[in-house]
Each structure stands twice: as C-alpha cells, then as structure tokens.
Amino acid sequence: GDVAVLVPAAGAGVRLGPGMPKALRALAGEPLLRHAVRRVAAAASVRQIVVAAPPAQADAVRELLSPVAPVTVVAGGAHRQQSVAAALAAVPDDVGIVLVHDAARALTPPDLIESVAAAVRSGLPAVIPVLPVVDTVKEVGPGDVVLGTVDRSVLRSVQTPQGFRRDVLAAAHASGADPLTDDAGLVEKMGLPVTCVPGSDLAMKITRPLDLVLAEALLRLP
Ligand code: CTP
Ligand code: MG
C-alpha cells in the first residue's frame, strides 16, 4: 500500500446527545470507531492508519482497535483541524498519498476509500467524494426571511475520505487558514483544484440520534 489514512476521532459528539465521545459510542454493540477502522483496513492501498483519539481515551482506543488492525494512536485537539494536524505529524516521509476520514462515517465502504486513493494516484492534488443535494436550499436573512433560492444543481454534499497528495495536505495545514469543517477547504484557499468523485450513501456521517437508527438499519441490510 502507498496510502496513509488519518482518522479524526477526537470529537465529543455534542449533537448525538450526552454520553461518551462519539467515536466510542456503540453501533450494533461495537464502538463507531471500530466499525470505521475495520473498513479502512480492508482497503488494499492502505499502508498506515493514524487515529486522533480523545486525549483522555487514547489508551482505551489503542486497546479497542488492536484486534482489528495495526494503528498509530495520537491525541486529538480541540478542533477537528488540530486533530488532523496531529495525525499528519505521525505519517512517515515516504508516504505519498494521505486520506482524511471521519470516524463518524463508520459504514464507509472500502471501495470508496480505494476510489479516492486511485484518483489521487492518477495525479490529482485533492479529491473529495460527493453526493447531489436532495433538498431545496435557501439563503435566509434577519427575521427568518428568505433572501433567495440557491441553484441546487451546482451544489454537492461532501463526505470523507478526502484524499490528497501528501505535500498538498501538509502545505494546506501549514497555511494557518482559519479552522474549516473539511480539509479540502484549506486546499481550495491555496488555489489548487479539488476534484469530486461519486460518494456513497453508506458514507453518511453519524451526527444526530436519527443517524444511529439509520446506521443500525443499514448494517442489517443483506
Ligand atoms: N473530530 C476530531 N477532533 C475534534 C472534533 C471532531 O477528531 N476536535 C472528529 C470527530 O471525532 C468526527 C469528525 O471529526 O469523527 C467529524 O466531526 P463531527 O461529526 O462534527 O463530530 P463531533 O465534533 O464529535 O460531533 P459534534 O460536532 O456534534 O460535537
Ligand atoms: Mg463537530
């Protein structure tokens, strides 16, 4: 394999409700993070997996992942971007392709990981999996008054894994840009192209309680 996968897993999971950090919450009796890492490890291109864990749970995370795959565990930070930067620092210099993949996208198929890695390998600096936006989207102003309707056909919902040439991701994180909700956003700010590939419904992010119900149902599908 020629790919390192960084797995930010240090978030609290506030939107999921009170409880353990989200990556350690159970989905069908198993922590979300273990579901995610098992699928990452099943992708043939993957050489190294680096998990950014909640700092207080780093040892617990090492233990719960040891039966699944060899992983490097580092302490995550207060913001997702800091967690990704901490994980990136643990990647050896000879790894040319780095993917960043949310632990919360626990059911992401290994095939999607391979397709993002392949697109980077083909020469693209940055690659993101996307889906069409299904709802009508409106911009809203003061007093909840609609300012306008956005043309949905040019919009995409963005998933992970996001894939990068290693030097591109390193430069993006060194750029000191304000925290964003994804890594590709940093690359866009550098003026480099970010290319979309088809995402997957299974790469949904488990964010709210309803998503856990949906994920359990997806796991029961034949
Ligand atoms: N993440 C991280 N470090 C942080 C914040 C988030 O590693 N300081 C990770 C989460 O663990 C998750 C991914 O980034 O795998 C996507 O973030 P999100 O879905 O927002 O998770 P949380 O931040 O945990 O959830 P919430 O925003 O509801 O608190
Ligand atoms: Mg968050």
Image (cartoon, rainbow, N blue to C red):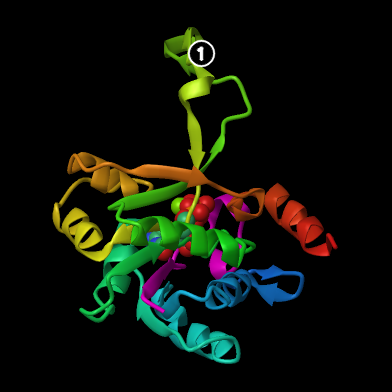
- 23 left or right of 100 in image: right
Residue bearing mark 1 = 144
Neighbor class of circle 1 (other Cα within 10 Å; few <14, some 14-19, many 20+) is few
**Secondary-structure class at tag 1:** helix
Q: Residue 136: give x, y in percent of width and height.
A: 59, 19
Question: Would residue 206 be visible to someone looking at this image?
Answer: no
Residue 186 in picture, x, y percent from top left: 25, 47
**Residue 187 is at least partly visible in this image:** yes
| Identity of the residue furthest to the front in this view | 122
Q: Nearer the viewer, residue 127 or 106?
A: 127
Q: Which residue is found at the position 53% from the left and 54% from the top?
A: 14
Q: Is residue 95 magenta?
A: no
138 lies left or right of 168:
right
Residue 11: in magenta span: yes
| Nearest the eye: 216 or 151 | 151
Q: Is 185 in front, or is 120?
A: 120
Number of on-image labels: 1
Above or below residue 213? Residue 82 is: below
Residue at 49% x, 33% y is 156
Task: Give the quarter of the image for residue 74.
Answer: bottom left
Report the residue at 69% width, 76% height from top: 30
**Type of residue at label 1?**
Asp
Identity of the residue drawn at 59% across and 86% down = 68
- Quick one: quadrant of the C terminus? bottom right
Q: Which residues are magenta?
A: 1-23
Question: Residue 211: image x %, image y %?
Answer: 68, 51
